[in-house]
Amino acid sequence: MTYSYYQGSIEDNPYTAKWGMLTKFLDLNDESLTPFEEVTFGILGFKSDKGVYINNGRVGAVESPNAIRTQLAKLPWHWGTNVTVFDVGNIDGPNRSLEDLQESLSLTVKRMLELNIQPIVLGGGHETAYGHYLGLKSSLQPDEQLAVINLDAHFDLRPYDQTGPNSGTGFRQMADHAKEESKDFPYLILGIQEHSNNLFLFNYVAKTPSIDFLTGQDLFRMSHQAILDRIDQFLEKQTAVYLSIDMDCFAVGSAPGVSAIQSLGVDPKLALMLLQHIAASGKLIGFDIVEVSPPHDIDNHTSNLAATFIFYLTQILSQQK
């Protein structure tokens, strides 16, 4: 298996190596595999933007996993020899249904966790989230709930009884799944834009005590410590957390290549501080980055920002193992 983003010289010296030189391929279908003992990450692509199309967004996120890999491969390796990064390939299939792709994603994430591989999932549209959530949740004990933090301009809590699942329904599907199990759905959204969500969604959130949010304007006005305190109030009640980063959370100047551009948005440097704080909690069991749309990007700004977030998140997560 050879991909252009990993081609180049093989560097054995971790002091001068880049991600693309030390990332290894792994076939999860190999039944002889046993759980890895060292700190291990696995890059998994979800090549689908079917949900974006259904949701009337700009298609193109299907090309995101390889675009992010290309940027990630250029970044310096900062771990020495005590961390392993595998690339486990993509969930793909243009002729498969969205539900079928999400099920494959769920099963693959479950397999990775069984092998003690922490998933780094590269969407795809935000329909990535529901499949990822189910895979993470399947690794928990039956009585353990999975909390969700979403960095996003949108709630993505739309009903789906008429349209079917799409990129704007994933977290509503999670809420309904939790309800079927008679559990709460702890959900914190950071970066909501009021002009990007209708009144129905704000009403739904207001009636759901387990859901909390801060708007993009809140993040701009509040002190850093006040924001961290709000996140900690959410985290202190949780044991396992799933983090989703929707790149449309950022203003178009920082992230032009997304499925739905944002005229206002969160400062990436502020977002990085919040993401690092969440990772340092020791409760994060998986994260994904979604809605990068390479056909609409400018000089790879958006895919490079996504790769940079992965770089800093994994530095902290590797210390939690």
Image: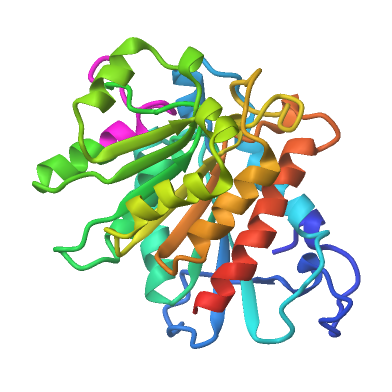
The reply to whether residue 232 is visible in this rendering is yes
Q: Quadrant of residue 257?
A: top right
Query: Which residue is at 81% across, 81% downward?
Result: 14
237 left or right, relative to 302: left
Q: Position of residue 250 (x, y in %)?
A: 64, 31
Q: Quadrant of residue 201?
A: top left
Residue 303 on image: x %, y %: 72, 42
> Is 304 placed above or below 189 here?
below
Q: Which residue sits furthest left? A: 182
> Residue 287: x and y, percent?
49, 54
Dominant secondary structure of the magenta stretch?
A: loop
Which quadrant: the N terminus?
bottom right
Seen at 48% across and 45% down, the residue is 226
The range drawn in magenta is: 161-173
Q: Is residue 46 visible?
A: no
Quadrant of residue 87 within the rendered picture: bottom right
Residue 166 counted in the magenta span? yes
Left or right of 76 in this view: 48: left
**Residue visible at 43% across and 51% down in the picture:** 229
Residue at (89% x, 66% y) in the render: 8
The colour mode here is rainbow
